Amino acid sequence: MAHYLRKLQIIMDRIDSSSVIPKYHQLKELLKGKIISGEWKPGEKIPAEKEIVKNCDCSLITVNKAVSKLVEEGYVFRERGRGTFVSPKQLWGNAEEPIVLKLIGMVVPDVTNDFGRTIVRGVEDYLHSRGYSLIIGNHDQNIDKAQNYVSLLLKKHIDGVIFSPVLGENYEEKNARILKKLNHRDIPVVLIDKYLRNMDCSYVASDNIESSCKMTESLIKAGYKKIAILKGLACTSFEDRLTGYKEALKKYSIPFDPDIVFEYDARRIDAGDIDQIVNFLSLNKSFSAIYTFNSTLAKGIVQALEKMGRKFSGDLKIVSYDNHILPHSAETTFTRLNQPEYKMGEKSAELLLQMIEKGTRKQQKIILKSELMPGKIDTINIAS
C-alpha cells in the first residue's frame, strides 16, 4: 500500500482547488490516467477511498463520486468487503452495466410474525425500486446465529446491512461486537426497531418513550392507577417504553412500584411456557390493569389467565404495545399502540442507500410516530 500512497500524493498535488472543473471530475480523470498508463493494472486493487481522502484535499463524498464514475465507465469494479479493483481492458469505457453487487443484507428476529413480515416488505419494496436485492436472515434473538449471518453476508460482498439488535443479557456489548465487525469492513449499517446507546450508528425506530407515556396516561385518565408491566428481555425499545411509563406516573404523582414490573422472555410464550406468568398473576392482586410491551407478551397474559380458568369480563384491563390481533382469537383486539412497521422498513432502506450511494457515515436518527388505537375487547376477569 505504501507505493500506492506515494503515487497518490503526486496525483493529489495536481488537483486544482481553484478550477471551475469539479474536484470529483479532476480526481476521476487523474485516477483513470493511472489505469490507462498501466501503473494500475487489470485485477489490481486500488487504494481505499479513505486512503485517497487522507492524501488529497477532497472529502469522502468527492472521492466516492469519482470512484463511482469510474465504476460506471467500466474502469474499475467494486467487491464489497474486499475493495475496488481495475477492470479488464475490454470493459474500459465500454461497460454496459457497472460491475457492482447491489446487494443488501438484513438480519432480524423473525419474519414469520406480522411485525417482521411488514418491516421486511417495506425494506424490500424500496430496495427493489432502486435496483437492489435483499438477503434476509432470522436471528431468533440468538447472538451466535446473528454473528453467523453477518459473517455469511460479508462473504457475499453485500453493500450494506439493516440489523435489528438481539435482545437479552449484555445486550449492548454483544451487539456492539457485530457492528464493530461491519465497521471494520466499512459496511454501512442501519439499525431498525432498536438501537445501541454505546454505538454511533444510524437507526430507525418508533417513538417508544412518547407513545408509552401516552398509553399509560390514557389508562390513568380512565381510572386505572395501579398498572402492572410485562416487558421482554433487555433492549432499548423496552427500556424506552418503561421510561415513558414512568414519566406518565410521575406526571400524575403516582409512585413507581418495581414489584409489578415483570420481565419475561417472549420466546417462552411461543413455546407454551407460561407458568411464571401464571405465578406473577396469582401473587399480584393489587393492580387493575396490565400493559404488555408487545403483542406476544399480551398473548402470554391471555394464555396464563385461561390456564387459571378465568373468563372475559371487566376486572383486568389489558393494553399492548403492538398493532397485531392475538393469534388465538381473531375477535380479541386489545387497545394497542400501532407501530408504522412498513414505513419503518422503507425508511431504513432509504437511509441505508443514502449512506451507500453518497458515502456518508454521519449518524442519523429517524423516529416514527405510533398511533394509539382503541380495542374491541380489552378486559379479562381474574376474580376467583
Image: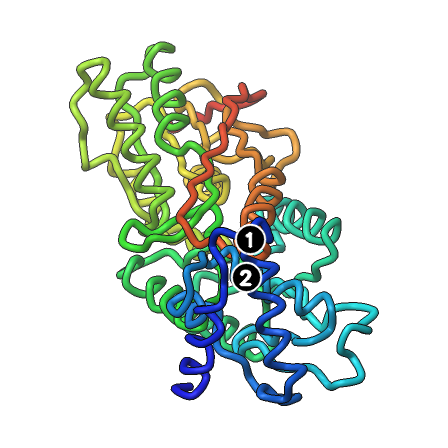
Tell whether label 1 touches label 2 (CB within 8 Å): yes
Q: Position of residue 279 (x, y in %)?
A: 30, 45
- Is 81 drawn above or below residue 259 in the view shown? below
- Is 213 drawn above or below residue 368 in the view shown? above
The Cα–Cα distance between marks 2 and 1, rounded to whole angstroms, is: 7 Å
Residue 312 showing in the rendered view: no
Q: Callout 2, which amino acid?
A: Asn
- Label 2 SS: helix
Q: Position of residue 271 (x, y in %)?
A: 49, 58
Q: Quadrant of residue 105?
A: bottom right
Q: Position of residue 371 (x, y in %)?
A: 52, 24
Q: Residue at point 35% right, 10% down? A: 221
Q: Quadrant of residue 219?
A: top left
- Is 350 drawn above or below residue 181 in the view shown? above
Residue on which disc 1 sits: 358
Q: Residues within 10 Å of mark 2 (few under 14, many from 20)?
A: many
Is 167 in front, or is 54?
54
Is 130 in front, or is 120?
130
Q: Position of residue 24 (x, y in %)?
A: 57, 58
Q: Residue at point 35% right, 39% down? A: 230
Q: Residues within 10 Å of mark 1 (few under 14, many from 20)?
A: some
Q: Residue at point 34% right, 68% down? A: 177
Left/right of residue 145 with respect to residue 114 in the rendered view: left
- Label 1 SS: helix
Q: Which tag, 2 or 1, sits closer to the chain's start?
A: 2
- Is 15 drawn above or below residue 45 in the view shown? above
Q: Callout 1, which amino acid?
A: Lys
